[in-house]
Amino acid sequence: MARSVWKGPFVDGYLLAKAEAAKASARNEIIKIWSRRSTILPQFVGLTFGVYNGHKFLPVQVNENMVGHKFGEFSPTRTFTGHAADKKARRG
Amino acid sequence: MPATRIQLGVIGRAHGVRGLVKITSHTAEPVDLTAYGPLSDAEGRVLSLRWVADGVAEITRYIDGVPVKVTDRNAAEKLTNTKLFVDRSALPPADDDEFYLTDLIGLAVTDKAGAAIGTVSIVHDYGAGASLEIERKTGASLIIPFTAACVPTVDIAAGRVVVVEPDEIIVAEDAA
């Protein structure tokens, strides 16, 4: 069942505090979080989070298209066997 | 250093009695397996594929430069588990600030001062930007975002990347 709209998106409180600190510092920083259940808010765009997958903190660079999704969606917990042999990575 | 040959696929089991085989393609688009020129097996023998159905192909071997089609099931079964390679140079050049994962894996990692940190072991990319996992000589592996701020220099020819480890945000609430 979908979450009621009147409640607004769920975000763990500590995450908002860390995001504000990161925006204020404007340095090369990563925000380590365990809250995979938190919704990605518009104010997180441009920040880089390290989202725990039970094993590692995988970097998640937040962009506009990710708003409304949960952090956990971008940090898979299952073993990944590898990307395509001709896959390219773009430097952000 | 980047690999000179890249495995793009593997021949699976025989399909039917006319020499067709199942193909497992490791390219982003499976049909692109045939888009990068001639394929070769682990021993360097040249093969070519022609797709006849989804995931099924006809194989042609080149014996002394002469093309010989695989036309029967017994010959096709002998090819099972043959790995298919292509020369790295056959892949089209990447755009600016874009790198093949295969080129990044294995590069030496140094800090800005030139001190060795380790080697790139894995490139993660799950839809939220790429990140490099660095296997350190000592201690746990390090994962850093593949951004210009964290990876200011990527020198494929020299076989090294320069990384700047990002700081970690710590706020007072964390201590509680």
Image (cartoon, coloured by chain):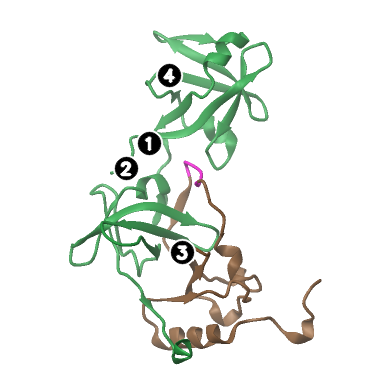
Q: Mark 2: which secondary structure?
A: loop
Establish if B90 lies above or below A6. above
Q: Mark 1 and 3 residues: CB-CB less than 8 Å, in contact? A: no
Q: CA distance from mark 1 to mark 2?
A: 8 Å
Pointer 1 local density, CA inside 10 Å: few below 14, some 14–19, many at least 20: some
Identity of the residue drawn at 48% across and 46% down = A87
- Chain coloured brown: which letter? A
Q: Say which residue label 1 marks.
A: B88
Quarter where residue A22 is shown: bottom left
Q: Chain of mark 4?
A: B
Q: Mark 3: which secondary structure?
A: loop
Q: CA distance from mark 4 to mark 1?
A: 15 Å
On the same chain, marks 1 and 3? The answer is no
Q: Say which residue label 4 marks.
A: B46
Instruction: Identify which amino acid the numbered label 3 is placed on.
Output: Lys
Q: Colour of chain B?
A: green
Q: CA distance from mark 4 to mark 2?
A: 22 Å
Nearer the observer: mark 1 or 2; the answer is 2
Q: Say which residue label 3 marks.
A: A56
Which stretch appears magenta? A82-86
Q: CA distance from mark 3 to mark 2?
A: 26 Å
Q: Mark 4: which secondary structure?
A: strand
Q: CA distance from mark 4 to mark 3?
A: 41 Å
- Seen in the image, is A65 located left or right of residue B1? right
Q: Mark 4 and 3 residues: CB-CB less than 8 Å, in contact? A: no
